[in-house]
Image: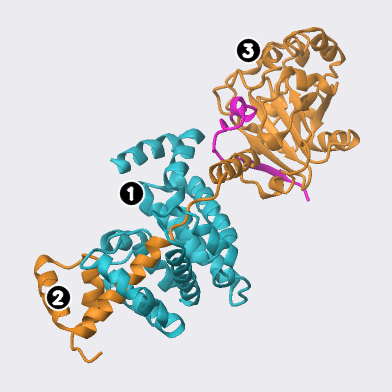
Amino acid sequence: MNCQGNPELISAFIDGELSDEEAASAAAHIDSCPACSKLRDEYQMISQMFADDAAEVPEGFTQAVMQRITAQRTARKKDHWKRYGALAAVCAIVIIAGVSAGVLRGGSGKSTGSTGATMKAADMAPSSPSLAAPQDAGAQDDFVYMEDTQEDSATQDTAGGTAGAGADGNANGGTVTEGAAQEEPQGLTDEPDRLGGTLHGMAGSTSEGKAITAAETGAFGLNASVTSLEQAVALAQELGIDYSLFVTKAGQDALVISLDDFRAFYETDGNLLYSEAGNEPESPWVLITQTE
Amino acid sequence: MAASMDAALVEQAKGGDTQAFEKLVRLHQNRVYGVALRMMGNHEDAEDAAQDAFVRAWENLPAFRGDCAFLTWLYRLTTNVCLDLLSARGRRKTTSLSGDEEAGARALEIPDPAPGPHEQAEKLERAQALRSALDRLPPDSRQIVVLRESEGLSYEEIGQVLELAPGTVKSRLFRAREKLRQDLLLHSGNIFSSGASKKQNQQKGGGDS
């Protein structure tokens, strides 16, 4: 090309990116210059090649994307959970605190004097902003082995409705998705090792982010009490549950212990924790403890 | 109008509405996939990259402040995902569209008004030549050429995607385009001459599409 013309201008010219004035002068030159005409033609042919070879997205693409997103939400961006995503249902234990679980709450540490089983949910949701961890948690009889709970729930259509031997907290037990507490339960971060509540049954598949229904909760016939992370872990292992424990209190607070790495995660909004896939909040989990 | 629709859907999606996000995926998947295919050079990698781009968009949606159009942002994510994947792929290229006959044929399944067998064959030839040439083009050149040629973005839009001034876009695009042209001349010079006369007549004075 012997032309003194600016090829960059030709590139911009075919893209329609020159001002009217520039374009007019470029056009005049190109038409009179064989080299520039050739260049223009070749650029245009390249454009045409792109146009002729347009691609369409493969079938099922949208679904594939949405599946990944749903799976990811369920996994809560926790890679270690993701690893198990494809496995069969992730077992989880729901500890429904029809129990005082002052421990869980990081409540005042005051023993209410009543057993958890007979506590009202309202009693359990005192404004307890206190971060003080209960010192006497391990010794509390608040954590009742609630044998009767299962029997009760088993006979109920609304399983879990009366679970917890009358604890109102368990009125929501079957539908943990309801009855969120509004207050911020902060105590846990101060007493990571301790949790209280009653192992109330098995949750559904976390990998699918399913809502835990009352029926599922009772499905495994679990009822046990735990007062510490160790106990929860031990129990889960005994039960052959490999990796995750869900702990919740009266449908409010929840603690998720992922046993594959013995990490515990605490979600402040128990209401949404067990909600249906797609409704979980994106709020981050708070790591409360990590033992080994 | 499309942008305002995007904005509304983006707001809903930010609030956790997956259905709104799904609509965004449907609206833009062809573009995202098109870019990914040009960047990655084969359908399999393109699909992975396009999916990654949308997943990344979902993840980063809270951080999307609407400083640019959603689509602009999406293009940025997509090309970045592709660049990441390409750099991970490194030099050890295995199959690419250059040798991917099946993929070439697939992309050409798009209905064409009255394509004669001869024209069909020519098109296939040109498509393969283009893919091979793109495959040899450095990824950053590929990126800017694709945004222009495949997506038809203006220099200003390209500048937003790549966060470059329009003047820089102009010069970089020219250089990338020149590389592509030189490569085609070198490897498939007949492409220009064979279809030239016919194409020129059709395209005379026309734009680029």
Is the residue under label 2 in contact with that under label 3 (CB below 8 Å)?
no
The part of the image, by quadrant, that contains residue A225 is top right
Image location of residue B128, percent across then percent down = 49, 70
Q: Is residue A155 above or below residue B9?
A: above
Q: Residues within 10 Å of mark 2 (few under 14, many from 20)?
A: many
Q: Quadrant of the C terminus of chain B?
A: bottom left
- Is the same chain shared between marks 3 and 2? yes
User: Which residue is identified by label 3?
Assistant: A122
Q: Amino acid at mark 1?
A: Ala
User: Which residue is identified by label 1?
Assistant: B69
- Name the front one of labels 3 and 1: 1
The part of the image, by quadrant, that contains residue A11 is bottom left
Q: Amino acid at mark 2?
A: Ala
**In the figure, is residue A5 to the left or right of A44?**
left
**What mark, if any, has residue A26 been given in the picture?**
2
Give the CA separation, mark 3 to mark 2. Answer: 81 Å
- Name the front one of labels 3 and 2: 2
**In the figure, is residue B188 to the left or right of A202?**
left
Image location of residue B170, percent across then percent down = 27, 71
Q: Range of the magenta residues?
A: A269-292
Q: Is residue B85 visible?
A: yes
Is B159 contained in the magenta span?
no
Is A276 contained in the magenta span?
yes
Question: What is chain B's hue in the picture?
Answer: cyan
**Residue occupying the point 45% across, 50% down:** B30
- Name the front one of labels 2 and 1: 2
Question: What is chain A's hue in the picture?
Answer: orange
Residue farthest along the bottom direction in this orientation:
A2
Task: Look at the numbered disc 1 and give the secondary structure of its residue.
Answer: loop
Task: Look at the numbered disc 2 and give the secondary structure of its residue.
Answer: helix
